Image (cartoon, rainbow, N blue to C red):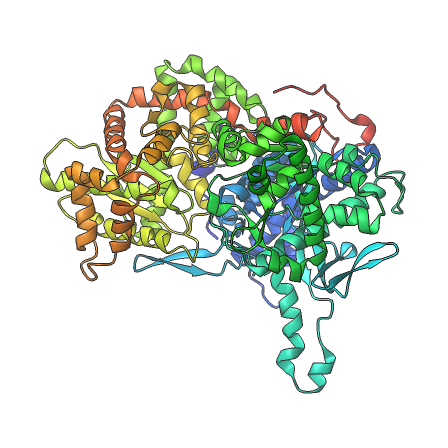
Amino acid sequence: MASHPQTDHEKRKQISIRGIAPVENVAEFKKAFNRHLHYTIVKDRNVATPRDYYLSLAHTVRDYLVGRWIRTQQHYYEKDPKRVYYLSLEFYMGRTLSNTMVNLGIQSACDEALYQIGLDIEELEEIEEDAGLGNGGLGRLAACFLDSMATLGLAAYGYGIRYDYGIFAQRIENGWQVEEPDEWLRYGNPWEKSRPEYVLPVNFYGRTETTDSGVKWVDTQVVFAMPFDSPIPGYGNNTVNTMRLWSAKAPNSFNLHFFNNGEYISAVCDRNQAENISRVLYPNDNFFVGKELRLKQEYFLVAATLQDILRRFKSSKFGSRDPVRRSFESFSDKVAIQLNDTHPSMAIPELMRIFVDIEGLPWDKAWEITVKTFAYTNHTVLPEALERWPVSMLEQILPRHLQIMYYINHNFLLEVAAKYPGDEGKLRRMSVVEEDGEKKINMAYLSIIGSHAINGVAALHSEIIKRDTFREFYEMYPERFQNKTNGITPRRWLLLCNPGLSDVIAEKIGEDWVTDLYQLRNLKKFAEDENFLRNVIKVKQENKMKLAEYIQEHYNIKVNTSSIFDIQVKRIHEYKRQLMNCFHIITLYNRLKRDPNQAFVPRTIMIGGKAAPGYHVAKLIIKLITSVARVVNNDPIIGDRLKVVYLENYRVSLAEKIIPAADLSEQISTAGTEASGTGNMKFMLNGALTIGTLDGANVEMMEEMGEENIFIFGMKVHEVEELKKSGYHPHDYYEGNKDLKQILDQIKDGFFSPDEPDRFMDLYNSLVYNDRFCLLKDYEAYIRCQDSVSEVFKNPLKWAKMCVLNIASSGKFSSDRTISEYAREIWGVEPNDIKLPPPHEGLDSMDSKPPQKK
């Protein structure tokens, strides 16, 4: 492996926020690395491969974690704090190595030690596979939250599923998305520890019977849940929390009876069916489809997790593994469970089943404890995304839970009837059991009824769910509804991914911003400092050059690093309006073709994201973008003034390269459709300016930075609602704007698909005759706003000043602030600044500071 050039290495060491590596730490690290390398290299091979070096580095770094991990869990066991359990079907973790080194404060020592050995740490980091156990924002938010919970010293646990295959790997072939399996575990995972001693049974199918001691669920099929634990280190506090992911295991790995009869396929069939539960992540893309396997995944997660939670609750102190708590009176004082969307909402009837059927609690007492324990985060207002499970499916797979949900609904409707006597319509609308067409259970309604707190993820989103989506439930339980605006972890999304900018900031305001992002407001006084602005410009240019090299290497496209790097990366969905971005590309292209000699601010427009495999329109959008890119990039008249790049296989590790290099961030969803967004916050923190609608967290971003530092266009939420009420006719906008008409006619007539002129007719028809997300209405305002962007970009210092004010205003959007609000206002726990002593020191040396309110 090539060693890193001296100049680059020295450059990374200059006044870095990561500090200078002490000589003794470097020597110790080298010794440990070489020891691991000795055991990593296969015995019959004398030469180490790059993967051997990576695994040796990972195991060496892991050594620093393990002692802290054990100590943290011992500390929780002895102090018995209230524990927070974050249940999510998705954890989009990305890579672990770099994040761990940063949070443990050993990155400089690792870098220096590997340099002395002759290795490049950046090359080794690239070998690690992304843990892509999520589809997008919801899963990445969960990962940021785990980082913040550890950094804030909360006794918190993430619970999810250890999918054998994460979000599919995306390949673009002939302009189309092709899905390939994401074999993230093909070489093993050095960051996890299997815990076979905590394997738990999970039941499916069967029937219920009434006995003298109550209802019993019998004749079930059993699948075992094997836990795999991954450490989650806090930043600089020696706290290491746990993410526990469950893997499905068959109770009998081999059916000998079938095998002896020569039925070899049948012998392993049952095993495969059981283990399919954790085989693959569902590519859920804001469109709910009631699949049996998905229901099994959701119940598998909550059934295993709740058994684990109860075990820990019963025996979490007094130095004994035997149950020491016989009463559940204190359960909600010791346990807080957060449901990340409705995916884990089956936990509500499951906890009731455990309390009533197994522990023998009276129904009313069990319900009181359950409601105090659960809290529910809503992530979408799109009606097609809300989970509704068919009663027929529940009756077959989870018959006892269906009975419990019926009884929960019965009691709730009695409550509604008492509050609104004689209002039959309200009873029908608020019922958890939907009777229209196929009978279904509305899981969002169940989550609201069974939780003491319900929150949206941005101020606008929370208002929409109170005013519209769940209006009648808000009127019923106004005290339960809250807002918790999303956030991102500044450790990964600035300190780790943008070291150049981190250092420039630290030189001016110190390092406290890493754990208190509000400190960035101190940058505002440097917004007129030309030297500081030029340093920010220099860092941005270096990041753009790195990304340009990556694009050249992977896509063979040479981009102009002096152009605006205009970037939209997120899941491909109609409401996110990647199509409108594509229309802007075609607008610029048509302008240049009409007048090649016009003054033109160069642009490199990058779009990336994955479409759900069954989402035809989203996949067609990708094909249109790549078709337009082929025409634009190969037109000699256009040259390097306009380039279009489709960023293949967008994922966390690619985001870490893209976001620091962005000049312009596209957040252009139809107002009222994006719950929050977190990509918008990542771009803002890294000094990109935003062009967007007043949707999701964009509204609060504008409030923080001022409307003069963001490019806002398009309809507001109430204007969208009024337009649709009065009757929206997209064809009128098609006929009324010649540029828009030209674009749609080009798409319709096959200008970008000459080999198949009708290829994009579905897109044309959906826009001109339906246009659910008002793209044609907002097009003109969007183009005007983009022209304003180009005008401002001509003045580098003005642009840089706006970038600095964006960075300085991003303190609110730290996940540390979000988690502090969850902790105090929902979970009833207090964040703390307690720094656990390192493993070689006694617990008596613990440095306890009063908690800071951030």
Quarter of the image for the C terminus: give it. Answer: top right
Q: Going by the image, does 120 lie left or right of 364? A: left
Residue 161 visible to an observer of this rendering: yes
Q: What percent of the width, then of the height, locates residue 258?
A: 70, 82
Left or right: 353 as drawn, with respect to 125? right
| Vertical arrangement, residue 22 with respect to residue 631, above or below | above
Q: In screen coordinates, is 632 left or right of 197?
A: left
In depth, the one of 579 and 317 nearer the eye is 579
Which residue is at the front of the view, 187 or 369? 369
Is any atom of residue 341 visible in this view? no
The quarter holding residue 560 reads top left
Q: What is the quadrant of residue 106 in the picture?
A: top right
Q: Quadrant of residue 174?
A: bottom left
In this rendering, is residue 346 above or below 824? below
Q: Position of residue 686 (x, y in %)?
A: 43, 30
Q: Is residue 2 above or below residue 756?
A: above
Q: Residue furthest front?
A: 422
Q: Report how many numbered discs are placed on residues in the image.
A: 0
Residue at 61% from the left image edge and 52% from the top image edge: 56
Where is residue 253? Give x, y as percent.
71, 71
Q: Point out residue 771 in the picture as x, y percentages from the top left corner.
A: 31, 43
The answer to which of 133 and 780 lies nearer the viewer is 780
The one nearer the camera, 419 or 116, is 419
Q: At 34% from the left edge and 19% from the top edge, which residue is drawn? A: 708
